[in-house]
Every structure is written in C-alpha cells, then in structure tokens.
Image (tube, rainbow, N blue to C red):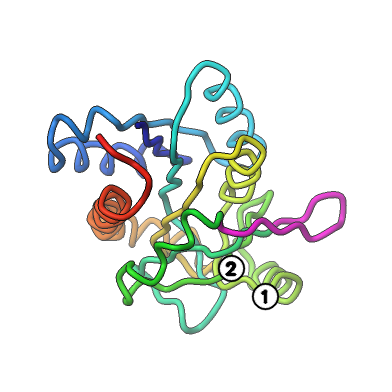
Amino acid sequence: MNILFTAALSRELKPVQSYLLSTFSIEKSSCFSFLKTGVGVKNAHSRLSEFLKTNSCDVIINVGTAGTLHYDLNLKEIFLPTSFHTIQKETLRTMELSGSISVLIPILPSSWKKGKIYSSGTQITLSSQKNNISKISNAVAVDMEAYSLAEICHKNSIPFVSLKVITDTADNTAIKTFTGNLNKSIIVLKKSVKQLVECIFNNFLITV
C-alpha cells in the first residue's frame, strides 16, 4: 500500500519527509512517496494529475501551512480540514472529507482544530481579503492548494486528508508572521503528521 505526501513548498515537504523516513520502520517507510506541487490551485492540480498518470496511491496526505481566518484558530496550532472550499467561475465550490478518512476524526488528537478551509487563487495579505473570504465561505483557515487536491482525489476515488499548521494571520502582517513562525511551526507539523500516519496504519484500510 502506498501513501503519497504532497506539499506546496520544499521547506514544508522536506522536513516532514526526513522525519517520517527516520522514525518509521523500513517496511512502513517504503510505502511513502513525496510530491512538491508548487504554490497555487493550478500548479497543485497539474502536478498531482501528472503524477497519477504513472503512479498509484492508496491515500494522499496534503501537508503544509495555512493562515487563520478565525480568532479561535491560533498560530502554530494544527488544523485538519473537514471540508474544502474555493471559488470557481464566481461560484463557491465545496468538497467534503471522504467517508473512509472521516471515520478517523474521533480518534485523532482532540487538540487538533477542525473545520472548513478555503483555497485561494492568490496570497492573502490584506485584512479586506481575509474578511471577504471568511464571509463568503465560513472557512476558518485559508491555503492555496487543498481544494484542487481534494477534487482530484475525489475524481480518482483516492482517500484524501490534509493537515496544516497555522503560520500566519492572513492579513496585512501575513508575510512577516509566516516568516517568523515557519521553522517552529514545521517542527509541530512533522510530529503531527507522524501521529496521523500512525492512526492510518492502525485504523484505516492499509496494511504493510
């Protein structure tokens, strides 16, 4: 069985990759593949689509960073999206977490925040953008890739889950906050990804 990990940036993906390969047994780590998609819904859609033309996987896990849209979602917290949203052709689109993955939610760490995520076509660096996204989607977090990955997985009947760490406030201070929080946030993320993978191996339909 194969698990594919995707992330937009090398600085998100490589620490997770190194940590997983060093902490899991050779038998289990041989099930792992890693794909950098690049930033944005179009890049993510293109890279994953190309990958799946020549590779198969049983689960896809998107890891990375996100901005908070809600006062209750704090910096360096782990966020697991339960639904994915974006605007396509001026219409709000929604993808739900697949049933086979959603059954794991009750046994995942209770400290992880859960809720809606919105995938933006542009980087959110203004409070006005943040407020508009929150209003139209009711999402509590924002990224730039998760929706397109969830959509591809749905079309290919591949279970999909995303795990994000909150690194910025998706407003006028977003770039500065992201830069200042990234290194410590990635440490939190990679340990949480390990917990997610252990949960999948122990409770999901994957054997090695």
The residue pinned by badge 1 equals: 138
Q: Is residue 67 above or below residue 2?
A: below
Q: Magenta segment range?
A: 86-97
Q: Quadrant location of residue 188? A: bottom left
Q: Going by the image, does 42 lie left or right of 113?
A: right
| Residue neighbourhood size for the residue with mark 2, other residues' Cα within 10 Å, grouped as few (<14), some (14–19), many (≥20) | many
Residue placed furthest toward the bottom: 71
Amino acid type at circle 1 is Asn
Asked if residue 8 lies in the magenta stretch, the reply is no
Q: Is residue 30 above or below residue 145?
A: above
Find residue 69 and report its image quarter: bottom right
State the image coordinates of residue 200 (x, y, percent, origin top left).
Answer: 32, 51
Q: Which residue is mark 2?
A: 116
Measuring 35% from the left and 32% from the top, which residue is drawn there? 1
Residue 200 left/right relative to 41: left
- Where does the C terminus fall, quadrant-wise? top left
- Most extreme residue toward the top is 54
Left or right: 76 in relation to 160: left
Residue 182 percent coordinates (x, y): 34, 56
Assess whether mark 1 and mark 2 are in contact (beta carbons under 8 angstroms): yes
Dot 1 crowding, Cα within 10 Å, few <14, some 14–19, many 20+: some
C-alpha separation, residue under disc 2 versus residue under disc 1: 7 Å
